[in-house]
């Protein structure tokens, strides 16, 4: 029993290892992959991004530009790597929760 009490006292005096997330923003790593965005002006509609997407989270709209279904995306970054004109970039945006599934479609 004394050993348990000693451990409790050590932990009471130690700094907490968790972060109060919503109030204290988290510092993201340099190579963090968040929400993919597409510069529609640079896009040449080659279709490579949709071909390499492992989850088939990329389709094309009426203008033949990619549309990202963020509910399916695993944020692997393959689409950004394969884009020949680098119109797709991975942002650091990760707070993407929504109640409406149509809001989780990025153009």
Image (spheres, rainbow, N blue to C red):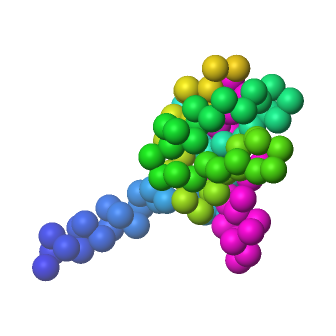
55 on left or right of 28: left
Q: Residue furthest top?
A: 85
Residue at left 24%, top 74%? Answer: 5
Is residue 75 visible in the rendered structure shown here? yes
Where in the figure is residue 58, as x and y percent of width and height?
A: 61, 49
Query: How far across and down, in percent of the image, does residue 50 sit?
Result: 57, 41
101 on left or right of 4: right
Residue 103 sits above or below residue 14 on the image: below
Q: Quadrant of residue 71?
A: bottom right
Query: Where does the image place residue 2, in percent across and percent down from the top left?
Result: 15, 74
Q: Residue at x 59, y 36 (%)?
A: 49
Total numbered circles: 0
Quadrant location of the N terminus?
A: bottom left
- On the image, the x and y values in percent for residue 95 come to 67, 58
**Residue in the foreground of this view, choosing between 94 and 103:** 103
In the rendered image, the vertical position of residue 29 relative to residue 7, given as above or below? above
Residue at left offset 15%, top offset 70%:
3
Q: Nearer the viewer, residue 93 or 25?
A: 93
Residue 53 higher or lower than 9, as above or below: above
Q: Which residues are magenta?
A: 86-107
Most foreground residue, 38 or 13: 38
Asked if residue 93 shows in the view, the reply is: no
Q: Is residue 14 magenta?
A: no
**Any magenta on residue 98?**
yes
Drawn side of residue 77 relative to residue 14, left or right: right
Residue drawn at (52%, 51%) of the image: 56
């Amino acid at each position: 029993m004394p050993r348990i009490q000693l451990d409790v006292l050590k932990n009471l005096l130690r700094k907490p290892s968790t972060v109060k997330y919503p109030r204290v923003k988290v510092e993201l790593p340099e190579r963090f992959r968040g929400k993919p965005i597409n510069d529609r002006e640079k896009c040449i509609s080659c279709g490579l991004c949709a071909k390499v997407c492992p989850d088939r989270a990329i389709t094309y709209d009426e203008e033949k530009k990619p549309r990202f279904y963020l509910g399916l995306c695993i944020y692997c970054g393959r689409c950004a790597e394969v884009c020949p004109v680098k119109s797709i970039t991975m942002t650091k945006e990760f707070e993407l929760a929504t109640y409406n599934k149509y809001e989780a479609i990025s153009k």
